[in-house]
Amino acid sequence: MGNNKRENLIIKLSMDFDNDLESKNLEKLPSYFSDDCQIELLGRTLKGQEGISEWLSWFFSNVDELRIVIINVIVKDNILFEEYALNAVTAEGTRIQSRQAEVIEFDQCNKIRNLRLYFDRIDFASNLLQHSVSR
């Protein structure tokens, strides 16, 4: 498979992944990941299918609604960098807007081997606190 075809496939897979996150497709989301995958966020590394389950459980117990707006995508070989705006509503009804980025490394079978999520913790927490206090 040529680089251009692989890069297009990686972009499509990441878009499908984002769409399944937005629709909370808990049955399909684990299928995007390899068995030996890692998810890195907030200084923690979650590994394998157990780590995926832990991340999705944490994420969806805190987020009721989710919308991802893509700002920038760069693909080189098997690595995708995506900058996006996350618009969410928490389980308590708080609206959150946060600019974030992710780096996804795909394996030879086009499964996610490594997902690294980056966001400003202070900005994210301030957004949550500001809305909670104002109520």
Image: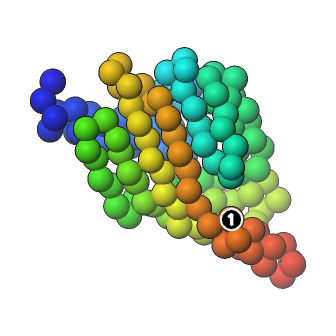
Left or right: 39, with 54 as reference point: left
Q: Is residue 31 left or right of residue 24?
A: left
User: What is the number of callouts on the image?
Assistant: 1
Q: Nearer the viewer, residue 38 or 17?
A: 38
- Give the percent coordinates (x, y) of residue 8: 22, 39
In the image, is residue 11 above or below residue 28? Answer: below
Q: Residue at x 50, y 26 (%)?
A: 33
Residue 65 appears left or right of 10? right
Residue 90 position, x and y percent, is 74, 57
Q: Position of residue 50 (x, y in %)?
A: 69, 23
Image position, residue 78 (x, y; %): 31, 35
Measuring 68% from the left and 65% from the top, which residue is drawn there?
Answer: 121
Q: Is residue 133 above or below residue 53?
A: below
| Residue 119 location, quadrant | bottom right
Secondary structure found at label 1: helix
State which quadrant residue 110 falls in. Answer: top left
Within-10-Å neighbours for mark 1: few <14, some 14–19, many 20+: few
Foreground of the two, 79 or 95: 79
Amino acid type, mark 1: Arg
Outermost bottom residue: 134
- In front of the other: 21 or 43: 43
Q: What colouring method underlies this structural image?
A: rainbow
Q: Is residue 30 visible?
A: yes
Residue at 26% in and 44% down: 76
The quadrant of the image that shows the C terminus is: bottom right
Q: Which residue is mark 1?
A: 121
Residue 38 sits above or below residue 123 on the image: above
Q: Residue 19, can we see it? A: no
Quadrant where the N terminus is found in the figure: top left
